[in-house]
């Protein structure tokens, strides 16, 4: 069976807390990024591209590629690989630029 | 951009052209500005004439260039915050209308119809339907392509000297890797046009005028026109070396909103100025409060090719037979490129001049002491 990174380093994390993706509960650990928590739950995509609406999630994992953008607590274009998960965070799948409300 | 336009129109007139650039296509100021094609910011005079001709030529070129060049006849909107500013705009527009510019006064209560996100705290504005926009780097590249086989492109090749004949006439240029021969040399070196002129032994006082641009994250259409504050026109016309900023905001088909404009003469200093960026952001959010909640992704700076009277140098240099100049277009080189190219092509082929080019004479500046 594949071992988790936490097992590999012998981590003893605090008990998990809950965040949500589009309302669905996802468990997260203290210190985990939003992207890591989603990945650990088997979720690989949380944004669609502006042109073509194709699925996107984390790619570089280190804040460089901007592929992992998500709407976090109503704020669009947060890099999920950098944003630390906090209890109760509401992540929503971001459609394109995530700014449809500004369109004129 | 200017070199590409000169090459395009010269090739179309049947000439064979070699384009030399020490860098890539659009590696100079063309790749470091915005792509507004404006008549709205120009007072009646030689530059406006050139801009009006150019705006017609850009419309023709847009038919020929692929959609990626992002030509958009979106129109400009100049806004004033108070009655005094509005009166000044009215005077300015009246003069322009006599010179062939279309301008419509927009009362304060109708601004919202044109730009829903504009602050309500404005006294009114003027709409200029002839203003347009392109993506300059792609426009330059595709114009060179559209010029066809008569244009040979040699990139990464620096001009290091001018070759002249027995009586001082131009025979070509020397480059880092050899010689290129031809009866005419066009100096389209933009901000570095003064250095190129010096290689030919003549003085042309082109100086860099630095400008920063803020680039927002990609957005839907938030700003429809090229929108700017009335004080922009005064800043453009100023000869001061000190920092000037005025709010200039436009959307792009790719998504990001571009925010300018700053002007200062600090040589080729590329260091980031937080003060300039702060002022640009403040100016843009004052006009469009909705932008306050939007992230700026990056910023870049470019060096406008500035000549002391704010007019470009276009045409033959009487001091060196065979040498022509097409540089010094300051903050309008994208807009003015097609007309410049056509004027240069006419000179090269001995055709009828298109307009009075005396104000653009390259030898109009007194020699430095
Ligand atoms: C912030 C900013 C915003 C702007 N916004 C606008 C706008 O909205 N609309 C507009 O019309 N204009 C705008 N401008 C101005 C516009 O970008 C310039 O006027 C225009 O790009 C000048 O084009 P050019 O071809 O003359 O110069 P460049 O694009 O600089 O081209 C000159 C070329 O010459 C090459 N060169 C120089 N010396 C040599 C040599 N010895 N040998 C070989 N090659 C050489 C350089 O590598 C360079 O590629 C803006 C400028 C800035 C900085
Ligand atoms: S995955 Fe590349 S920036 Fe987040």
Image (spheres, coloured by chain):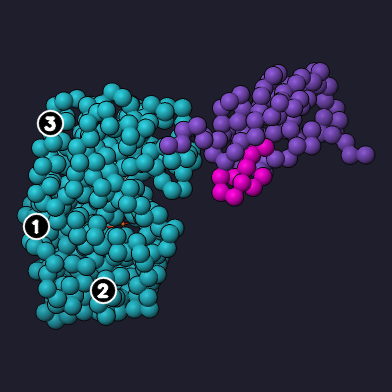
Residue in front for this viewpoint, B26 or B169? B26
Q: Is disc 2 in contact with disc 1, using a CB cutoff of under 8 Å?
A: no
Give coordinates of residue B255: x percent, y percent: 46, 44
Judging by the rendered image, the residue that carries numbered circle 2 is: B10
Check chain identity for marks 1 and 3: say if they share one. yes
What chain does badge 3 belong to? B
Quarter holding the N terminus of chain B?
Answer: bottom left
Q: Is residue A51 magenta?
A: yes
Q: Which residues are magenta?
A: A46-55
Label 3 belongs to which residue? B87
* Residue at 24% across, 28% down: B108
Q: How many other residues sit within 10 Å of disc 3, few (<14), some (14-19) or many (≥20)?
A: few
* Secondary structure found at label 3: helix
> Mark 1 CB in 8 Å range of ligand 1?
no
Disc nearer the start of the sequence (2/3): 2
Quick one: label 2 or label 1, which is nearer the N terminus? 2
**Mark 2 residue's CB less than 8 Å from ligand 1:** no
Q: Is residue A68 left or right of residue B339?
A: right
Up the image or down, B352 lies above or below B108; here it is below
Figure quadrant of residue B246 = top left
Badge 1 element: helix
| Residue farthest to the right, as pictured | A1
Other-residue count near label 1 (Cα within 10 Å), few / some / many at <14 / 14–19 / ≥20: some
Q: In the rendered image, what is the letter of the chain coloured cyan?
A: B
Main secondary structure found in the magenta portion: loop
Subunit bearing disc 2 = B
Q: CA distance from mark 2 to mark 1?
A: 22 Å
């Amino acid at each position: 069976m594949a071992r988790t990174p936490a097992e590999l380093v012998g981590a003893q994390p605090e008990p998990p807390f809950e965040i949500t993706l589009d309302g669905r509960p996802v468990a997260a650990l203290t210190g985990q990024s939003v992207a890591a928590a989603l990945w650990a739950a088997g979720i690989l995509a949380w944004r669609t591209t502006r042109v073509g609406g194709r699925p996107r999630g984390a790619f570089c994992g280190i804040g460089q590629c901007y592929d992992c953008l998500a709407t976090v607590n109503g704020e669009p274009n947060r890099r999920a690989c950098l944003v630390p998960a906090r209890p109760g965070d509401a992540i929503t799948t971001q459609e394109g630029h995530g700014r449809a409300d500004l369109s004129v | 951009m200017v070199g590409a336009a000169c090459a395009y129109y010269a090739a179309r007139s049947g000439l064979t052209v070699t384009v030399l650039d020490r860098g890539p296509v659009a590696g100079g100021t063309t790749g470091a500005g915005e792509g507004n094609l404006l008549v709205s910011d120009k007072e009646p005079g030689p530059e406006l004439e050139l801009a009006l001709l150019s705006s017609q030529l850009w419309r023709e070129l847009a038919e020929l260039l692929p959609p990626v060049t992002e030509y958009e006849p979106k129109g400009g909107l100049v806004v004033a915050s108070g009655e005094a500013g509005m009166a000044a705009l009215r005077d300015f527009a009246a003069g322009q209308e006599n010179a062939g510019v279309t301008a419509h006064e927009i009362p304060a209560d109708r601004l919202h119809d044109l730009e829903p996100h504009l602050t309500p705290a404005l006294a009114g504005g003027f709409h200029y339907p002839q203003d347009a926009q392109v993506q300059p780097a792609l426009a330059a590249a595709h114009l060179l392509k559209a010029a066809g086989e008569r244009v040979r492109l040699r990139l990464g090749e620096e001009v290091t000297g001018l070759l002249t004949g027995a009586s001082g006439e131009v025979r070509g240029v020397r480059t880092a890797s050899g010689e290129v021969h031809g009866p005419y040399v066009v100096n389209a070196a933009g901000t570095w046009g003064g250095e190129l002129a010096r290689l030919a032994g003549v003085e042309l006082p082109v100086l860099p005028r630095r400008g920063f641009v803020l680039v927002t994250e990609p957005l839907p259409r938030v700003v429809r026109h090229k929108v700017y504050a009335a004080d922009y026109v005064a800043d453009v016309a100023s000869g001061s070396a000190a920092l000037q900023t005025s709010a200039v905001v436009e959307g792009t088909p790719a998504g990001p909103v571009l925010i300018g404009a700053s002007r200062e003469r600090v040589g080729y200093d590329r260091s980031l100025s937080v003060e300039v960026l702060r002022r640009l952001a403040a100016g843009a959010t004052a006009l469009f409060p909705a932008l306050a909640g939007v992230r700026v992704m990056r910023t870049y700076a470019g060096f406008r090719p500035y000549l002391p009277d704010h007019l470009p140098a276009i045409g033959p240099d009487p001091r060196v037979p065979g040498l022509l100049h097409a540089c010094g277009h300051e903050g309008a080189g994208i807009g003015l490129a097609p007309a410049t190219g056509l004027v240069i092509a006419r000179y090269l082929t001995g055709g009828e001049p298109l307009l009075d080019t005396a104000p653009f004479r390259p030898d109009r500046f007194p020699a430095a002491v």
